[in-house]
Amino acid sequence: MKHQKQNSGNERPERSATAVAHANIALIKYWGKRSLSRNLPAVGSISMTVDSLKTETEVSFEDTLEQDHFELNGKKVKGPARERVSSFLDLIRPTERETYAEVVSTNNFPTGAGLASSASGFAALTLAASRAAGQHLKKKDLSRVARQGSGSAARSVYGGLVEMKRGATPDGKGDYAETLADEDYWDLRLVVVLTAEDGKEVGSTQGMIHTAETSPFYSKWIDEQPADLEAMRQAIVQKNFEKLGELTERSCFKMHGLMMAAQPSLLYWNPTTVMVVQKVRELRSQGIPAYITMDAGPQVKILCLPAWIDNIKQALSTINSIKKLWICKPGPAAEIISREKEKA
Ligand code: DP6
């Protein structure tokens, strides 16, 4: 992380803040938009924030800069990715005059491979940038702003189990996330299985547009989502793990079914993805309650309870093409890291 510059004479102080946000994995998926310009979701969604995958971002607004600078994992970012950050910062910049920012960000996991890096990335950026701009936003408002960077980022503002609401108005007032249960409520595990390290071929935004335009199942997906969300809320209130798992797996396959039925078809999986899915089915037939979910990439996430982690690890050890595993617990909300804490 960058160090604060010395401030001499009557120069204005550098306005800087550092935030950390964790990725989240959707149990009931978000796929589809009702407005592209405001990034309003066509459906609500429910997710679990995870402790092991995180982004740390420092934002400094500096009067001397002539444009925004964005560094990710030690490398300067240019082109569309920098533009995306820059136009997002337009929502937050100190308004008294045009001020550009130095953004330094680190992910502790592969970027853009279907591991929710845009969720933790935009949540950390929203919190750090708004604080650096002197704003102390309520979580609901942070979530609304983060949503405009990436829909799933609205959920990473909170820890534990989180619901993103689909609002009813075109201004996006009702489109924000809320906490359903904090990270201590239920001792769940998500085993994140990395099957490929490369970036994804079709990003979520493009994939959603393509699916909405060409998939014959899209309207059915939209119609059924409220019932899936309600069933998931019930499963969480009742701590019914089997129900939680079944609903999670079903929402995942519904979303991938939509994608596969698009024209041309969108298929995010690789052979290892399918091997992991089969392995989890095998485990279930042996009485081990484990359920899968997958996003816009080839990685598989396995939902389970702590008691079964060893069995699952053992079963996965037979698949040589798996690159890496993370055993994740429910993770915390996004937070500002103070410089004292950073040094400790
Ligand atoms: C498959 O939040 O990445 O992970 O709003 O266009 O940035 P944009 O999309 P994004 O989509 C996430 C899609 C998903 C499912 C989910 O996280 O709910």
Image (cartoon, rainbow, N blue to C red):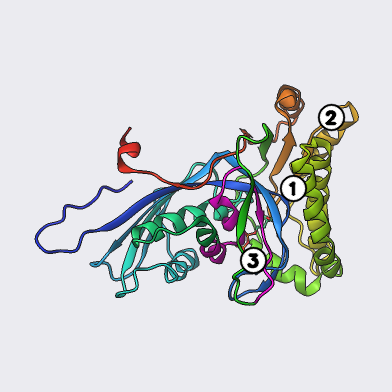
Q: Which residue is mark 1?
A: 270
Q: Residue 235 or 86: which is nearer the viewer? A: 235
Which structural element holds mark 3?
helix
Which structural element holds mark 1?
loop
Figure quadrant, ligand 1: bottom right
Q: Please indicate whether residue 15 sits to the left or right of residue 216 in the image.
A: left
Ligand 1 closer than 8 Å to the CB at disc 3? Answer: yes
Amino acid at dot 2:
Leu
Disc nearer the start of the sequence (2/3): 3
Residue 107 to residue 41: above or below = above
Residue 264 to residue 283: above or below = below
Amino acid at dot 3:
Thr
Q: Residue 269 or 19: which is nearer the viewer? A: 19
Q: Residue 97 or 269: which is nearer the viewer? A: 97
How far apart in space, not on screen, are marks 2 and 1 (Cα)? 21 Å
How far apart in space, not on screen, are marks 2 and 3 (Cα)? 34 Å
Instruction: Give the x, y percent position of residue 226.
Output: 80, 60
Q: Please indicate whether residue 87 sits to the left or right of residue 14 in the image.
A: right
Q: Tell me the mark number nearer the camera, choosing from 2 and 1.
A: 2
Disc nearer the start of the sequence (3/1): 3
Q: Residue reaching furthest left?
A: 9
Q: Residue at x 34, y 39 (%)?
A: 342
How far apart in space, not on screen, are marks 3 and 1 (Cα)? 21 Å
Instruction: Give the x, y percent position of residue 87.
Output: 46, 71
Magenta span includes 206: no
Q: Which residues are magenta?
A: 144-169
**Label 2 close to label 1 by CB (< 8 Å):** no
Q: Which residue is mark 2?
A: 283
Which structural element holds mark 2?
helix
Quadrant of the drawing holding the C terminus = top left
Q: Which residue is mark 3?
A: 205
